[in-house]
Amino acid sequence: MSSIRIRFHYNTVTLNESGVVDGHKSICGSTVEVFGRDGSTERFDFNGFRQYQDYRDSLIPVQFVKIWNVAAYYADDFARPEFIDSGYYCIGVYEANERAVYLLLDEDKLMTRKLDRPLDGRKEKHRNLNNVVPIRSA
């Protein structure tokens, strides 16, 4: 069964369509972090995987979402993990009826894209701060 490993507050949790597989002490449960249009994030239940081919030529409107903090993808229980860099997000589908998201697979590969800008400028804010001050004057 396919699964993912997510990062959450300095912890990792492994999820599949049944719920939490590893990391039982996690406070996030079986949820993943999704980007909003304004750059904010919100947590939704993770319900598994779907094939991109099912949605590519669909006439019904589909709400694609960006899922952040996915660290690795496992094709099955015995497969080696495919690690995902922190500068990338995964593409998923939001199902409004279930209030849950599914990650999209393209020919059994997780669909990922590079982040086009830093999140909310957080890294740049901290990088530009000069917060080192001497304790004693010389």
Image (cartoon, rainbow, N blue to C red):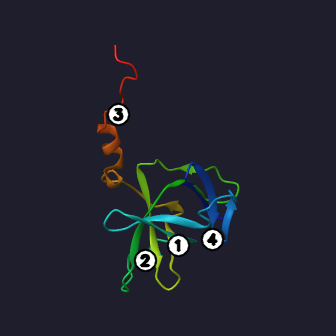
Would you say the residues marked 2 and 1 are in contact, meaning their CB atoms lie under 8 Å apart? yes
Q: At numbered mark 4, what does the secondary structure look like: helix, strand or loop? A: loop
Q: Which residue is mark 2?
A: 55
Say which residue appears at 34% left-offset and 62% top-offset.
39
What's the mark number on residue 50?
Answer: 1
CA separation in Å, label 3 and label 1: 46 Å
CA separation in Å, label 3 and label 2: 49 Å
> Counting residues from the N terminus, which is met first, the one under dot 2 or under dot 1?
1
Would you say the residues marked 2 and 4 are in contact, meaning their CB atoms lie under 8 Å apart? no
Look at discs 3 and 1 and give the one toward the viewer: 3
Q: Which residue is mark 4?
A: 17
> Counting residues from the N terminus, which is met first, the one under dot 4 or under dot 1?
4
Would you say the residues marked 3 and 1 are in contact, meaning their CB atoms lie under 8 Å apart? no
Say which residue appears at 55% left-offset and 55% top-offset.
8
Q: What is the x, y in percent for residue 6?
A: 56, 56
What's the mark number on residue 131?
Answer: 3
Question: Which amino acid lies under the numbered mark 1 shown in the image of this protein?
Answer: Arg
Would you say the residues marked 3 and 2 are in contact, meaning their CB atoms lie under 8 Å apart? no
Q: At numbered mark 1, what does the secondary structure look like: helix, strand or loop? A: strand
CA separation in Å, label 2 and label 1: 9 Å
* Nearer-the-camera pick, 73 or 115: 115
